[in-house]
């Protein structure tokens, strides 16, 4: 019986193609360390690598298997900059902060690619990313964005595409225009998870799977994490549970909300005109559609966000319908894998970093833009432990309000709000 994640629905194509996936034992007993990391996605694993390399005694625990959350199951798109366009950040925070946030994200991208290369982790990197307008009225924004990026933020890799070029590069005439970014690309995320865990173990971090934190306390600056079969006492703690926090820590839970997102993989497409250049794509919908080809020629199509935490029964049907809207020839294409995961979003859709208790920092809420940022924020956390908090503070200082409605009402309120945006995408 193949392993199937118990926190995310469906078995992913990544699980079938990632190669050997070492298991790590569960914690059984009490431990003492410098830093305890809760959550073994990109954030936690990357932090464990950099902390251990800097000489900290690190223990990392995950409630399931590393990568079973968003990190091993996502769309694999790196993107460029923060989730919000740099010009939007400039309008909110001024040019110098917007530029600093953009440069930080560029460093995050470079870091991810360099980390994989130096540590010989094959992540199946494919170059190119297109962002496309599903309404004519957004096309001018994309055109202006390409110019602003080149002229104001010093990023020359984005070019504007008119409707004809967009249709050629997508192999679909359903979009009205967009941008093409040759300075970024997409990866096999589970391979990066597995590789990063190995590097963390080699660096001396103690890694445990199937070990949920059931409580975190900080008394007199000393941290204690409780698990079913043992406790961990530490000087510091990183919470990197993202969308999966539940009731573990109330401040993070009030600011980070889980949203289901689902992906289908088709059979390899022979002689297809779909994405001939191999770029990844995201579109202008609020309920975004994102897709790309895999190294073996499948279409990996993500598109249906469900604004409630119920699992979908029928990922294949919905994904195939969305694929057929763009590629009518694929209306009967076989979908071999359908899976989902939970994206951690914040109200303004920017990342959340906060010291939620003395010596306990929570990091997450990347809002669908965490592949490169989460890996880098793990490193920034390690920098913070080493005494330099300046760069993590750039994110900490963002204005991230809690979701309204408290724990009981926020899910239904968000459900209505986001359904309104989904409706708006269609008109
Ligand atoms: C379907 C999907 C598509 C996406 N596509 C993209 C994309 O194309 N580009 C992009 O940039 N971003 C994308 N994202 C978002 C991106 O994957 C995340 O931002 C990123 O992986 C977050 O990493 P993380 O380590 O913070 O969280 P996660 O990877 O979610 O890891 C959290 C970990 O915490 C563990 N955990 C939870 N509770 C406990 C506990 N009590 N004790 C111990 N461990 C616990 C979980 O088991 C999990 O392994 C996507 C997400 C999804 C779900």
Image (spheres, rainbow, N blue to C red):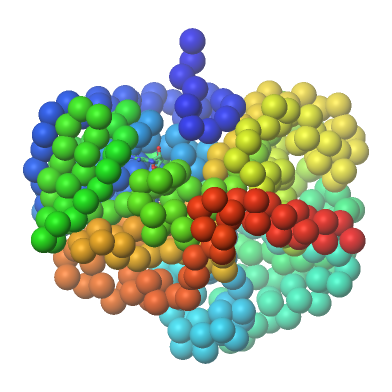
Residue 213 seen in render:
yes
The residue that appears at 68% across and 81% down in the rendered structure is: 147
Q: Nearer the viewer, residue 130 or 230?
A: 230
- 7 w.r.t. 48: above or below: above
Horizontally, is 220 left or right of 155 in the view? left
Residue that appears at 69% across and 77% down: 145
How many numbered discs sit on the rendered protein?
0
Q: Position of residue 281 (x, y in %)?
A: 69, 53
Question: The C terminus lies in which quarter of the figure?
Answer: bottom right
Q: Height in image: 78 above or below 23?
A: below
Choose top left, top right, bottom left or bottom right for residue 272: top right
Between 2 and 254, the residue placed more toward the observer is 254
Position of residue 70 measured from the top left corner of the image (x, y, whole percent): 49, 43
State the image coordinates of residue 33 (x, y, percent, origin top left): 11, 46
Q: Is residue 81 left or right of residue 307?
A: left
Residue 366 appears in view: no
Residue at 26%, 61% (x, y): give it.
357
Q: Quadrant of residue 391?
A: bottom left
x then y, percent, for residue 26: 25, 26
Q: Nearer the viewer, residue 229 or 86?
A: 229
Compared to 295, does 303 lie above or below? below
At x 48% / y 82%, what residue is drawn? 99
Vertical relation: 4 (above or below) 191: above
């Amino acid at each position: 019986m193949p392993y199937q994640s118990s926190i995310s629905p469906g078995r992913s194509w990544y699980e079938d193609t990632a190669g050997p996936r070492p298991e790590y034992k569960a914690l059984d007993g009490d431990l003492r360390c410098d830093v305890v990391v809760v959550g073994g996605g990109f954030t936690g694993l990357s932090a464990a690598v950099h902390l251990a390399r800097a000489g900290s005694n690190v223990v990392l625990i995950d409630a399931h298997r590393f990568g079973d959350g968003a990190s091993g199951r996502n769309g694999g798109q790196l993107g460029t900059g923060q989730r919000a366009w740099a010009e939007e950040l400039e309008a909110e925070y001024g040019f110098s902060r917007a530029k600093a946030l953009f440069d930080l994200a560029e460093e995050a991208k470079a870091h991810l690619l360099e980390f994989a290369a130096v540590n010989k982790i094959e992540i199946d990197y494919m170059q190119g990313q297109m962002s496309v307008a599903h309404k004519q009225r957004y096309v001018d924004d994309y055109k202006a964005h390409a110019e602003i990026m080149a002229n104001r933020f010093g990023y020359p890799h984005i070019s504007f595409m008119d409707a004809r070029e967009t249709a050629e590069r997508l192999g679909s005439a359903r979009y009205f225009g967009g941008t093409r970014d040759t300075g970024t690309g997409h990866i096999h995320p589970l391979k990066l998870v597995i590789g990063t865990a190995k590097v963390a173990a080699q660096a001396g971090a103690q890694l445990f799977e199937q070990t949920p934190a059931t409580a975190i306390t900080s008394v007199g600056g000393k941290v204690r994490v409780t698990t079913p079969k043992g406790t961990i006492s530490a000087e510091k703690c990183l919470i990197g549970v993202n969308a999966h926090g539940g009731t573990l820590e109330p401040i993070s839970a009030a600011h980070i909300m889980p949203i289901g997102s689902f992906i289908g993989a088709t059979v390899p497409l022979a002689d297809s005109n779909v994405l001939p250049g191999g770029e990844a794509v995201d579109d202008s919908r609020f309920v975004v559609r994102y897709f790309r080809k895999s190294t073996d020629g499948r279409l990996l199509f993500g598109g249906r966000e469900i604004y409630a935490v119920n699992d979908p029964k029928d990922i294949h049907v919905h994904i195939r319908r969305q694929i057929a809207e763009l590629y009518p020839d694929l209306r009967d294409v076989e979908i071999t894998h359908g899976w989902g995961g939970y994206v951690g979003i914040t109200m303004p859709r920017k990342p959340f970093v906060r010291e939620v208790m003395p010596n306990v920092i929570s990091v997450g809420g990347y809002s669908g833009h965490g592949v490169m940022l989460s890996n880098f924020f793990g490193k920034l956390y390690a920098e913070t432990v080493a005494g330099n908090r300046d760069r993590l503070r750039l994110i900490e200082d963002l204005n991230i309000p809690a979701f309204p409605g408290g724990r009981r009402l926020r899910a239904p309120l968000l459900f209505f709000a986001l359904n309104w945006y989904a409706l708006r995408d269609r008109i």
